[in-house]
Every structure is written in structure tokens, then in C-alpha cells.
Image (tube, rainbow, N blue to C red):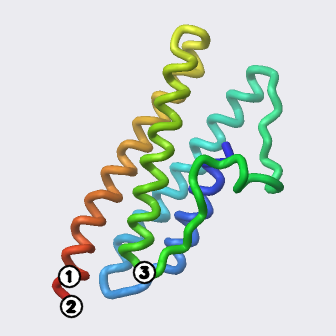
Amino acid sequence: MATEIVCILRYRYHAIAATGIASESVKQEFEEHAGEEEQHLIWIAERINQLGGKPDLNPDGVSKRAASQFVEGEDLVDMIKENLVAERIAIETYRDMVRYFADKDPTTRVLLEKVLAQEEEHANDMHDLLVAHEGMQIAAH
């Protein structure tokens, strides 16, 4: 959950702070991803609650518990790179959790597989944006 919180905040910050001639479509992508990360957080928190656990949404210690970091990025390409790195970390984390829950809790496993599929889409989106915008950055120099 902490990783999802950090991802929501990073994407929302990037959606607000991104600048440059090509930033509008990227800002929209960042905002869309922030909303999907928020949905992941809700699904996971609800599942923890269903299992009798207590979802930890306390902001104290979120950055310590998260698998990825909140990095602002210097420019649009940096922001895209930071989100790509974070998505790849999330993908590995979810893959590990899917393997862990395998047959122990099929309902949780299916939920995590759903989240994993969206994280993989996010990583593909960030990769495509990176390729496109690095090319623009090189052409501008």
C-alpha cells in the first residue's frame, strides 16, 4: 500500500509540474496513472480489511515502507524515467506477491494479478513516452 501511495503522489506531482512544449499529453498520462494507482490502493486496502487486517494508511513511515521512491525529476524526460523505474519496481514486487499467494489465497492472487497487469501497462506507457521524448530532447540540442 505504501508503494501505491508514493506512486500516486509522484504521478500527481509530475502531472502538475511537467513543463515543455510536449508536456500536455504526458501530463494527462501521468494523471491517468495516478488515478489507476489510487484504485490499486483502494482494492488492496479493501482486501486487507476483508481478511481481518488493518490497512495502514498512516502517512508516518510511508516512504520507509514503500518499495519505490518519490523523486521529482529535473525535466519531463527525468519524470518519465523516474516513473518507469518505479513501475518496474512495482512489477517485481507484485510478481513476488503473486508467487507468494499462489494457491494459499487465490482471491488475493487474482486481485494482485489484475494490479500487476495494469502496472505492466504503465511501464509500457512510460517506455513509449521515454522513447518519444528522448528523441525530441536529442533533436532540440
Circle 3 sits on which residue? 75
* Horizontal and vertical percent position of residue 92: 46, 37
Question: Mark 2: which secondary structure?
Answer: loop
CB within 8 Å, label 2 to label 1: yes
Judge whether 58 appears above or below 10 on screen. Answer: above
Image quadrant holding the C terminus, namely bottom left
Inspect the image, locate mark 1, and give the three-letter code of the amino acid beneath it.
Ile
* Horizontal and vertical percent position of residue 114: 46, 31
Image quadrant holding the N terminus, namely top right
Question: Residue drawn at (60%, 47%), measured in percent from left and top?
Answer: 67
Inspect the image, locate mark 3, and give the three-letter code of the amino acid beneath it.
Asp
Q: How crowded is mark 2: few (under 14 residues within 10 Å), some or many (20 or more)?
A: few
Circle 1 sits on which residue? 138
Circle 2 sits on which residue? 141
Q: Residues within 10 Å of mark 1 (few under 14, many from 20)?
A: few
Question: Mark 1: which secondary structure?
Answer: helix
* Horizontal and vertical percent position of residue 127: 30, 57
